[in-house]
Amino acid sequence: MQRYVIDSSVFNKLYLDEADRDKAQQLFVQAAAGDAMLLAPDLLYLEVVNTAQRCGVPVKSVVDLLEAQQYLLDMRAVTAAERKKAIQIMSKGHVKSGYPSIYDALFHAMAICNNAVFITADKRHYAKTQTLGSICLLSDISF
């Protein structure tokens, strides 16, 4: 079974009409079929609710969606090892192009530390950290 850490940008596609929405939905179909395991730091909950509010989507409906996905998406606190790896990931980048945020780095670190693949729609984070491995753009994933 393939293990994936999903980014908030991927989960948000479940309720926002954005490119690659069908691929985000397919990830959850795969998890429901037992073909994929979905993980995320509990930070995902906060980021998703924040995006809903910012985009004018009723927060209660998004909270309901998050809760409905609990059995498919294992959200948990990050470990000490994952935090340490996230700090290392933050150093990847360049003064001109920027460095990965601690938030994005935590998702990526969870993937690296758990033999999983971080799936993101964030092309900037991907560009800065693809050499670390364990990362894939949602747009590039195929089922």
Image (tube, helix red, strand yellow):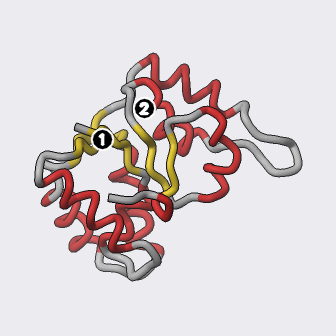
Residue at point 28% right, 35% down? 76
Q: Secondary structure at mark 1?
A: strand
Helix, strand or loop at label 2? It is helix
Q: Is the residue under label 1 in contact with that under label 2 (CB below 8 Å)?
A: yes
Q: Amino acid at mark 1?
A: Leu
User: What residue sits right under mark 1 in the picture?
Assistant: 39
Indicate the position of residue 126 as horizontal and vertical percent values: 61, 50
In percent of the image, x 33 and y 52: which residue is there? 45
Residue 110, numbered label: 2
Q: Residues within 10 Å of mark 2 (few under 14, many from 20)?
A: many
Q: Nearer the viewer, residue 54 or 141?
A: 141
| Left or right of residue 69, residue 9 in this image | right
Q: Foreground: 130 or 94? A: 130
Name of the residue lying farthest toward the front: 143
Q: Report crowding for label 1: few under 14, some 14 to 19, many 20 or more residues within 10 A (C-alpha).
A: many
Q: Residue furthest right?
A: 96
Q: Amino acid at mark 2?
A: Met
